[in-house]
Image (cartoon, grey):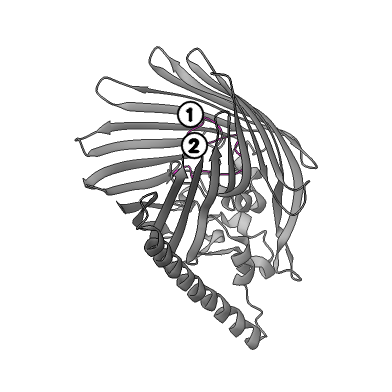
Amino acid sequence: MMRRLVIDLQTIRLRRMVPDRKTNRHMRACAPQAHRCLRRRVFAAAVLFLTSALSGQNAVNIFGYFESQMMGADIQNTFYHIQTNKLRVDLKYSPSHHVTFLANYNGITYHGKTQWDVLDFLPDGLVSEIPESLAGFYVIPFEDQYVLDNANLRLTFSRFDLTVGKQQISLGSGYVWNPVDVFNVKDVLDPTYEQPGHNAVRLDVQLGKSFSLSALYAPEDTWSRSGKLVQLKGRIPRFDIALLAIETTWHFHDYTSFDYATYQFQDFPETRRVLGASTEGECLGLGLYAEYGYNLMERSPDFQEWVAGMNYTFDSQTFVMLEFYRNTMAKADYHDYNINDWMRFLASEQKTVARDQLYMFIQQPATDFIDIGMSGIWCVSDGSIALVPTLTWSLLENVDVMAYANVNFGAGGTAYSRLMGNGGLVRARVYF
């Protein structure tokens, strides 16, 4: 697929209707529409209220962007596309140098093909193993979203900062893959796109000039299910280093077992503990970085992830990057990939279906306002390859255009098989 289709498990379980119950079918079809209308009104009211109430105060900054995006892919000799419109409104309020409030609200509408069947991307041999009664449950719907993506209060003092609320959590030094980041999973075709916020309480304490200690708590329904993180960061000559320990609940779903009582796939949560380290720095003009995480699982087998990468900018401003990723939880032979591997990957429950991958990127300024580039992802485990030519263009002041195409070269069932669809994306964004 031209981009990973991220699954909302709640909408997936409502996608399948009970064929013999017309009343239930009508109610389930109408309820999401009513909720979408309500969310639109709440979003519009919130934007108008915040803009009118806060824009007159000198201490409040209101900014953001509007983004229109078109994605398309050739799936089984038919070209499909989906278009999105996104409005992001950011607020920053600092009544004093000790207090900062940050928030952003996103509104996203989807148009075109908003229902995608995962089974269209998988080989016939794998699809044939799925019970006919479950076939309709693998449809991914894209529904309009109106969400408070981030909202947090930061208290700043001489020796420590305290941040409370929904906030960005970014861990690790990797560009495409981050073994120590249990909160986010990047899109390999678009790894720099913004990640969602996460509800947490975070404390950052400065330990002298070169080291700091961070502690984070992401509350769930119980202490044992909640996320806990401790990280020590420091600076040695030429390199930044970080050591961290994480405990969280990892939700694995069995996508071959459907619970008709709850109308969702069976959930098997388990405790996941990560001991990890990351580093990045420079040596003789060469950027170097590495990241490692050892995962101790409650029931599943323990596994390791690691990333090693390098980058360099030539005098001609040509930028090159190379990054290798290994995940021992994933499988080395693509013939062993099953429906759970694919669905957990698409649902961002795991980072990959393949054990070893190599990412390559090169970018060259064509003019002062246009950069052209090419990325390639080689799945070492199964031999498949994806090529992604890119273009970024500062079209006007505060207006950017980004485009990429993706072409997959791989046998059916591999990580970057031709069945996943060749396509592309065009994104235009205006900042305010």
For label 1, the residue is 323
Place of residue 105 in the rendered image (x, y in percent of width and height, measured from the top left): 46, 58
388 versus 8 height, above or below: above
Image side of residue 374 versus residue 334, left or right: left
Q: Is residue 36 magenta?
A: no
Q: How many labels does the image show?
A: 2
- Single out the residue that lies furthest toward the right: 299
Q: Residues within 10 Å of mark 1 (few under 14, many from 20)?
A: many
- Alpha carbons under labels 2 and 1: distance apart: 8 Å
- In front here: 183 or 99? 99
Place of residue 133 in the rendered image (x, y in percent of width and height, measured from the top left): 68, 70
Q: What element carries label 2?
A: loop
148 versus 356 height, above or below: below
For label 2, the residue is 176
Q: Can residue 306 be seen in this view?
A: yes
Place of residue 116 in the rendered image (x, y in percent of width and height, measured from the top left): 50, 63
Labels 2 & 1 near each other (Cβ < 8 A): yes
Q: Residues within 10 Å of mark 2 (few under 14, many from 20)?
A: some
Q: What element carries label 1?
A: strand
281 versus 307 height, above or below: above
- In front here: 97 or 413? 97
Image side of residue 320 versus residue 419, left or right: left
Magenta segment main secondary structure: loop
Q: Is residue 234 visible?
A: no
- In front here: 282 or 191? 282
Comes first in the chain, label 2 or label 1: 2
Residue occupying image coordinates x 49% and y 48%: 101
Which stretch appears magenta? 172-189
Residue occupying image coordinates x 29% and y 26%: 318
Amino acid type, residue under disc 2 in the picture: Val
Task: Name which quarter of the figure residue 229 lies in.
Answer: top right
